[in-house]
Image: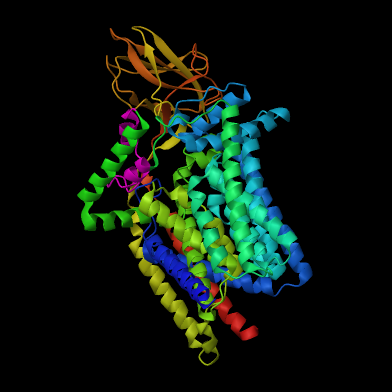
């Protein structure tokens, strides 16, 4: 028993140390992705302190409410969350891109009764399970007569996310209503949950499953009758199996659950028997679930081709490519796909990994691990602003000001991420000091450590793979928030202390503003995306061959003015581009015999247009298009039903990241909020 207790306390300390390490990395978020031009570390740290101060004041206020007031606040917070989610679900509809394009296309084909699977799924069989889930949802939409499937899927995903929130909310409500209300405030302000609610992919599907597993595990540990033990064991096994089948990296959660199951004592009459039965039941459920899913896949026409599928070792080798920070890269995948058999792929992957490790050396390996760790866990956006690069529906104000809006939201995500990490690390240290660890904290923490080790050491690394950390951090903050030592307590002896703190805060914030002043001068020349149809190149490289003097015409509609056109990759083309209004009037034509397919043209107003690409060369010319059984754009290519030209329509924009007014509004708001926090804490000390 003592050994188990020592191991448990040691794990608690390791979890807190891991969270503090992540906190340190998050002060310097990576800039190689779409998120960049961050606030300086000092500004992020000050923002984190203000955030925590606001949480502290809110928590104190919630604690002072009567039971009736708590119920009113609870209803109000749930209504606010649901109203915001409904607005987001109906105002924004993300366009399926990259992997989502293939998943969506295959799901639509399955609904129509076609069981011919795209070649993509034989290379990436991990997406087959979610494709079947998506096909089932689309069938339900058809049965209900719903034609706007984008909004339908958004609403379904928000409901699914809310189920995870509801489960944790109920657990907290039984302990302390103030903590359940605090959770609701944290969820309402968690931007990534809204972004992923618009993302119909397995990342969203598995989001609540870790929360379900923690709650089921907690009840299993406290069960003292065989009926309750059996029920919670079955439920836990089903949740873990579903998570693994949707996302293979959730194998880490299964390992974490088994570790905690055998380390922690439980309240059953026969603890060893309960552990053994739960373990066997979990293994049996995994075997049964895997078999059922494979049969389901076969019944829908899919069967794994081992000679085409990428072997496990190929992902490990790709993650150790020093040129890509451990990210997915098409070059490695292409080389692996060229190997004809499963054995040849495995041999190539093993040799590639050995060569890269040898080339990196000890110092290079440590540096690469650091780069992978930063990419995986340093950004609190969890890739929220890259997973939905294009929208088929979005408010015009967001399209026009997307760069600025995303910048503010990304920095808010980073500040809140830092605060969540700090609270959870502090809660863990407090539990270690008391030598008693919460089951939820232990299981969630071991899962976090395992997920970090899995992706940083072995697997491909992207920010979105760390998304399961977010609901755990939100729940941990609501469950474990404690007021830190309030040095304003000593202000009863010296009324100058609050003034001194306010003055020190002002000096530090002034220094942070000076460090971040480059935001007003650094040019953000990224164009405004007016319309984007970027499919056709990823994986399939689908092309239409134009005969000499033949044309390809793509109708499109814009809701914003534009002055840039990019077709394919903007290379030269032996022909001409012609832009016409919907009434047939020509408004622009390219010049020269071989113009670039990336053109700057006079500013055109929002409206309906057609873009015609004509081949004036003597040979066939290739243009990339994307085939789809659903609408990538309101209209497909004329004469080519279910095909869409790969092109982008943009509006040039050259401006600083933040204007002077927005910059000083930001730091002025931080200054006033910080002074308010100091003043309110001092007020509470005097009046409570």
Picture quadrant of residue 542: top left
In this view, the residue in front, 386 or 22, is: 22
Q: Is residue 600 visible?
A: yes
In this view, the residue in front, 681 or 563, is: 681
**Residue visible at 30% across and 23% down?**
596
Q: Is residue 30 visible?
A: no
Residue 452 percent across, percent down from the top left: 43, 56
Furthest residue to the bottom?
Answer: 493
Q: Quadrant of the N terminus?
A: bottom right
Residue 316 in the magenta stretch? The answer is yes
Q: Which residues are magenta?
A: 313-340
Residue 643 in the magenta stretch? The answer is no
**Residue visible at 62% across and 53% down?**
281
Residue 171 percent across, percent down from the top left: 68, 63
Residue 655 percent across, percent down from the top left: 37, 45
Q: Quadrant of the C terminus?
A: bottom right
């Amino acid at each position: 028993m003592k050994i188990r207790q020592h191991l448990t306390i040691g794990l608690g300390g390791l979890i807190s140390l891991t969270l503090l390490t992540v906190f340190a990395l998050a002060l310097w978020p990576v800039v190689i992705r779409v998120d960049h031009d961050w606030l300086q570390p000092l500004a992020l740290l000050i923002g984190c302190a203000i955030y925590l101060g606001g949480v502290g004041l809110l928590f104190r206020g919630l604690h002072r409410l009567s039971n009736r007031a708590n119920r009113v606040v609870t209803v109000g917070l749930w209504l606010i969350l649901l109203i915001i989610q409904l607005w987001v679900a109906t105002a924004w509809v993300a366009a399926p891109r990259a992997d989502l394009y293939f998943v969506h296309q295959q799901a639509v084909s399955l609904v129509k009764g076609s069981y011919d699977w795209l070649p993509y799924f034989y290379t990436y069989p991990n997406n087959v399970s979610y494709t079947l889930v998506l096909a089932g949802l689309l069938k339900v939409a058809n049965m209900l007569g719903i034609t706007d499937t984008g909004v339908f899927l958004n609403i379904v995903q928000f409901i699914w996310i809310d189920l995870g929130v509801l489960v944790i909310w109920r657990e907290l409500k039984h302990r302390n209503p103030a903590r359940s209300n605090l959770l609701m405030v944290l969820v309402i302000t968690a931007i990534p949950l809204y972004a992923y609610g618009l993302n119909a992919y397995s990342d969203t599907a598995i989001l609540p499953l870790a929360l379900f597993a923690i709650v089921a595990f907690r009840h299993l540990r406290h069960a003292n009758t065989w009926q309750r033990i059996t029920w919670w064991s079955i439920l836990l096994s089903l949740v873990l199996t579903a998570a693994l089948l949707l996302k293979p990296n959730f194998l880490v959660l299964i390992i974490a659950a088994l570790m905690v199951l055998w380390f922690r004592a439980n309240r059953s009459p026969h603890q060893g028997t309960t552990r053994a039965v739960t373990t066997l039941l979990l293994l049996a459920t995994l075997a049964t679930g895997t078999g059922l899913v494979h049969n389901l896949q076969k019944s829908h026409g899919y069967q794994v081709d081992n000679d085409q599928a990428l072997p496990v070792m190929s992902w490990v080798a790709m993650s150790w490519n020093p040129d890509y920070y451990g990210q997915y890269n098409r070059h490695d995948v292409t080389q692996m796909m060229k190997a004809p058999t499963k054995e040849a792929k495995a041999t190539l992957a093993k040799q590639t990994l050995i060569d890269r490790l040898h080339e990196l050396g000890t110092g290079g390996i440590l540096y690469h691990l650091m780069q992978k760790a930063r990419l995986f866990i340093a950004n609190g956006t969890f890739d929220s602003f890259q997973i939905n690069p294009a929208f088929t529906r979005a408010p015009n104000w967001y399209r026009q000001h997307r760069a600025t809006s995303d910048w503010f939201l990304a920095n808010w995500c980073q500040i809140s991420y830092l605060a969540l990490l700090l609270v959870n690390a502090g809660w863990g240290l407090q539990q270690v000091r008391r030598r008693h660890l919460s089951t939820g904290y232990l299981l969630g923490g071991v899962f976090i450590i395992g997920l970090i080790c899995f992706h940083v050491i072995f697997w491909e690394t992207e920010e979105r793979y760390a998304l399961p950390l977010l609901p755990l951090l939100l729940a941990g903050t609501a469950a474990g928030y404690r007021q830190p030592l309030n040095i304003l307590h000593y202000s009863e002896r010296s009324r100058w202390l609050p003034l001194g703190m306010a003055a020190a805060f002002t000096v530090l914030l002034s220094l942070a503003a000076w460090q971040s002043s480059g935001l007003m001068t650094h040019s953000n020349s990224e164009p405004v995306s007016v319309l984007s149809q970027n499919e056709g190149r990823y994986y399939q490289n689908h092309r239409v061959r134009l005969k000499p003097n033949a044309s390809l015409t793509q109708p499109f509609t814009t809701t914003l003015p534009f002055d840039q056109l990019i077709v394919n990759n903007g290379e030269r083309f032996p022909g001409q581009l012609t832009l016409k209004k919907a009434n047939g009037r020509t408004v622009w034509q390219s010049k020269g015999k071989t113009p670039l397919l990336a053109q700057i043209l006079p500013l055109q107003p929002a409206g309906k247009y057609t873009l015609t690409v004509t081949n004036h060369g003597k040979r066939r010319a290739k243009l990339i298009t994307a085939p789809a059984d659903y609408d990538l754009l309101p209209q497909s290519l004329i004469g080519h039903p279910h095909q869409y030209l790969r092109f982008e329509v943009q509006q040039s924009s050259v401006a600083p990241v933040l204007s002077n007014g927005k910059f000083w509004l930001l730091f002025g708001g931080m200054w006033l909020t910080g002074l308010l926090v100091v003043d309110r804490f001092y007020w509470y000390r005097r009046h409570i």
